[in-house]
Image (tube, rainbow, N blue to C red):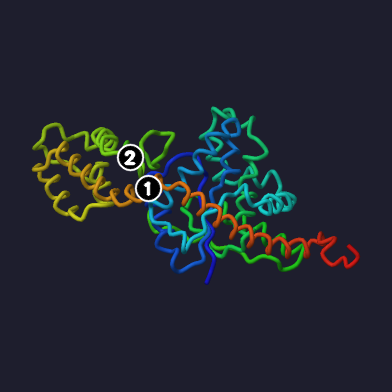
Amino acid sequence: MKTIITGDRPTGRLHLGHYFGSVKNRVDLQYDYDTYILIADVQALTDNFEAPEKVRKNIYELALDYLAAGIDPKHSHIYIQSMIPEIAELTIYYSNLVSVARLYRNPTTKNEVNQKQELFGEKGEGITYGFLGYPVSQAADITGLDGDLVPVGEDQLPHIEQTREIVRKFNHIYGETFKEPEAYLSTTPRIKGLDGNDKMSKSLGNAIYLADSEEEITKKVMSAVTDPQKIKKDDPANPDICMVYYYHKLINNNVDTICAECKAGSRGCVACKRELVKALCDYLAPIQERRHYYEEHMDEVEAILKDGTKAARKRAMEVMKRVREHMKLDYFENNSNE
């Protein structure tokens, strides 16, 4: 059985973009692969270094969302990055194999720096060593547990390619140690925000969260972008530029009728939005029911995280024993006089 390594930074609750873009896929894959799901708290600190309590709190929020979405602890290991010191050790070794210039050329890193100008400055002059080295840390996450496949969206492909480059260089210097992981590209395109933005995002305020109440969902959906040319209720409209129809297509089986009525002018936007609210609430109901259960049983969540971290640590220790041997760092492994 091949191993999947995937995960998220604990920066807040998961939204529909996360769910359809990656989490739903993980739920489907967990029965066919040895699955390790990382809560990347160390990487979250690269741009939240002044808010450790926020990161700590979000570890549990993220775990709750995973379990609510259908991640099964009997088939998946959910683990905390900072509790695996072998990953940090491997990150240091990898940092010697990657130039600063190469890190600056990573298009995903460039994009993230541009999005965080308030933190790093307009020209990125305040970028930290830790943030710039994010792809190196990610490479250690993947290879430190002998990952075969990494489910990602297209925007993360540069990180996977950088991991493969690091593996090739490491193997060339120290001998065959790691396999080159492969990207498992999501078949779901990036989910748009309610405002029509190409990305659903916490920072843009255009997201519907898995844990949102009916009241919150209603408020957000009623403000969603529709066809600006539709002025009156019976005006025909173009559903292809309407975000309400976009979300209907994700979860509603009635999309053909919705599309036809919208084009014919027999469907008003308010009624269409109310139908979407109901469809979203119905879709999220089983997810929120599971979340409520685990919120009432946090001792189980704690045990799941401990067990998952223990399994990941055991695997990482086995990998690092091999790494130290190949790097000639196994000083006392065979010392019979100790």
User: Mark number for residue 212?
Assistant: 2
Residue for badge 1: 291
Q: Residue at x 60, y 34 (%)?
A: 49
Q: Split into 4 quadrants, where in the image is the C terminus?
A: bottom right
Q: Residue at x 26, y 52 (%)?
A: 251
Tag 1, which secondary structure? helix
The residue mark sitting in front, 2 or 1, is 1
Q: Quadrant of residue 142?
A: bottom right
Q: At which x and y percent is residue 258?
A: 16, 49
For marks 2 and 1 on the same chain, the one whose residue lies earlier in the sequence: 2
Q: Residue at x 78, y 64 (%)?
A: 325
| Residue 220 or residue 312, whichever sits in front | 312
Q: At which x and y percent is residue 132?
A: 64, 41
| Left or right of residue 126: residue 55 | left
* Tag 1: amino acid: Arg
Q: Furthest residue to the right?
A: 337
Q: At which x and y percent is residue 66?
A: 43, 51
Q: Residue at x 13, y 50 (%)?
A: 260
Q: Are marks 2 and 1 in contact (CB under 8 Å)?
A: no
Tag 2, which secondary structure? loop
Q: On screen, 338 above or below 244?
A: below
| Residue 286 or residue 25, whichever sits in front | 286
